[in-house]
Image (cartoon, rainbow, N blue to C red):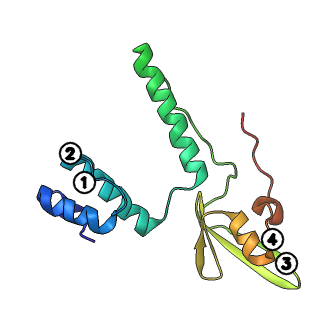
Amino acid sequence: MQYIEDLNEMSREELSLLWRKLLPETKAPRRSDRMIRELTYRWQEKVNGRLDKATKVSLRRHMMTFEASLRKGVDQPVVQTPARLKLEKCSVISRKWNERGISVKVIGSREFEYDGRRYKSLTKIAREITGQHLSGPLFFGLKEVKRG
């Protein structure tokens, strides 16, 4: 696919051709700016993966607050969605499982590295290790911070 910057330079016909190539099952928007926005999003989704459930919930909450502020004509405070676990970047979480030492590096608030691969949750890592669905924080002996 083209780089995102190249999309702004493309004609309507070129954008439509790219749309049909990447999204054949979906009807293209009439406006070029909306087509560019959607193509950009789909490209980023392909490169970085889809949004996780927590991010979608957070975005929905922010949009509800924004829409309420538009209806009332008053700015609403931004909704804060704190991370459920407070983990420092570059820290390492470790434990022993079936006589095997396990280490997970914290890369970001929702990004971890285990066995040379990146994961978006500790739960996915726990499932990878045990083969069954377990709470990641519980598996690694971490307590979750209660939301207020």
Which residue type carries mark 4? Gln
**Which of the image's four quarters has the N terminus?**
bottom left
Please report whichever mark, 1 or 2, sits nearer to the chain's N-terminal start.
2
Please report whichever mark, 3 or 1, sits nearer to the chain's N-terminal start.
1
Circle 3: element type: strand
Cα gap from disc 1 to disc 2, whole angstroms: 9 Å
Disc marking residue 31: 2
Which residue type carries mark 3? Lys
Which residue type carries mark 2? Arg
Which residue type carries mark 1? Ile
Q: Circle 1 is placed at which residue position? A: 36
**In percent of the image, x 76 and y 77: which residue is there?**
129
Cα gap from disc 2 to disc 3, whole angstroms: 56 Å
Q: Are marks 4 and 1 in contact (CB under 8 Å)?
A: no
Crowd class of label 1 (few under 14; some 14 to 19; many from 20; radius 10 Å): many
Q: Circle 3 is placed at which residue position? A: 96
Q: Position of residue 6 (x, y in %)?
A: 18, 64
Circle 2: element type: loop
Crowd class of label 4 (few under 14; some 14 to 19; many from 20; radius 10 Å): few
Crowd class of label 3 (few under 14; some 14 to 19; many from 20; radius 10 Å): few
Circle 1: element type: helix
Q: Position of residue 139 (x, y in %)?
A: 82, 65
Q: Are marks 4 and 2 in contact (CB under 8 Å)?
A: no
Crowd class of label 2 (few under 14; some 14 to 19; many from 20; radius 10 Å): few
Q: Quadrant of residue 98?
A: bottom right
Q: Position of residue 22 (x, y in %)?
A: 32, 67
Q: Are marks 2 and 3 in contact (CB under 8 Å)?
A: no
Q: Is residue 101 left or right of residue 39?
A: right
